Image (tube, helix red, strand yellow):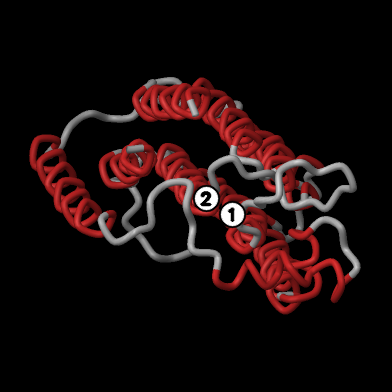
Amino acid sequence: MLELYILLVFMIIGAIIAVEVKDLLSSVVTVGAVGLALSMAFLVLKAPDVAITQLVVEILCLIILIRATIKKDLPFAATGRWFLNTVITVGFIFVFLMVCAKCLKDLPAFGYPLMRVAGTYIKEGLMQTGATNLVAAVILDYRAYDTLGEATVLFTAVMAVLAVVRVKGRKDPNEEEAGDE
Amino acid sequence: MIYILCLAFFCVGIYCILRKRNVIKIIVGIIIAEYAVNLFFILIAYRMEGRSPIHSSDNQILNMVDTLPQALVLTSIVIGLATTALLVAIAMRIYEKYGTFDITEIRELRG
């Protein structure tokens, strides 16, 4: 599992750079690099379908974010209660990590899942659905209502983006960002 | 141990959301936190010496990894793209109206 550790450390370093860099475009490009590393981590963890989806979504996300930040790079003010904000934020993260440390004791160890539900899917999926790819069997047969809800959410989001972006009485060709989905 | 690294990745995103004042930076923090949660679910699904859940005729390894979290994460990634597009659209409208991305300058509720 050495490659997984290397990828995770790379992702954490990339996330810190994306948070702390001053230039917005550099930040967005760094997030793109982190997403591609995440796709490789999914491949290492034996999840090829998720890796492919992550790759496509990452490219679309990068296009949308670059479209939003390409010519609006403004310096932002550094006045205000920075010390208090930092103390509150670090305190919250510390409490969160304490709770997580208590919760992680109850998880099964890494690499040995319980698989009460998925055992049935793996044993009988090929007979009941006829799909050799079991993730496709779960998505499109056992839990098809989840996929229907996902499509509904996508449709609603596209309608909301159109309603927000559309400006009445102005035909601007570069406002067609919602067509990316 | 690897769960701890994943949680640290999540905390970077949380720190970005809570601390930054630029709207685009906050969106970047939301994206990072979302990546961390997706990775955590796939880590839970992993099985030692397992193989990807696709039937093939020449399989030596019989143990497959857990399919259910993979299906859920597949749904979650696509929904994350939709929410990101919506956030970016709202941020662009805020920039058109106020001329800035600083959240302390945005004090009105009129659209």
> Between A7 and B61, which is closer to the camera in this rendering?
B61
Residue A157 placement: quadrant: bottom right
Q: On the image, numbered disc 1 is attached to which residue?
A: B80
| Residue B8 locus on image (x, y percent) | 32, 38
Dot 1 amino acid type: Gly
Q: Mark 1 vs mark 2: which is more N-terminal? A: 2
Say which element carries label 2.
helix
Identify the amino acid type marked 2.
Asn
In this rendering, the answer to whether B39 lies above or below A158 is above
Report the Cα–Cα distance between label 1 and label 2.
Answer: 10 Å
Horizontal side, residue A157 vs residue A133: left or right: left
The subunit letter for the residue under badge 2 reads B
Q: Horizontally, is B103 left or right of A173 in the view? A: left
Residue A4 in picture, x, y percent from top left: 50, 29
Q: Tag 1, which chain?
A: B
- Res. B25 image quadrant: top left
Q: Nearer the viewer, mark 1 or mark 2?
A: 2
Dot 1 crowding, Cα within 10 Å, few <14, some 14–19, many 20+:
some
Q: Nearer the viewer, residue B11 or A131?
A: A131
* Residue sitting at x 25%, y 56%: A105
Q: Give the x, y percent position of residue A109.
A: 38, 50
Residue A165 in picture, x, y percent from top left: 66, 55
- Circle number at residue A132: none
Question: Residue A77 occupies which quadrant of the picture?
Answer: top left
Point 62% across, 52% down: residue: B65
Local crowd at mark 2 within 10 Å, few (<14), some, or many (≥20)?
A: many
- Residue B38's label in the rendered image is 2
Relative to residue A16, is residue B47 depicted above or below?
Answer: below
The residue located at (59%, 40%) in the rendering is B49
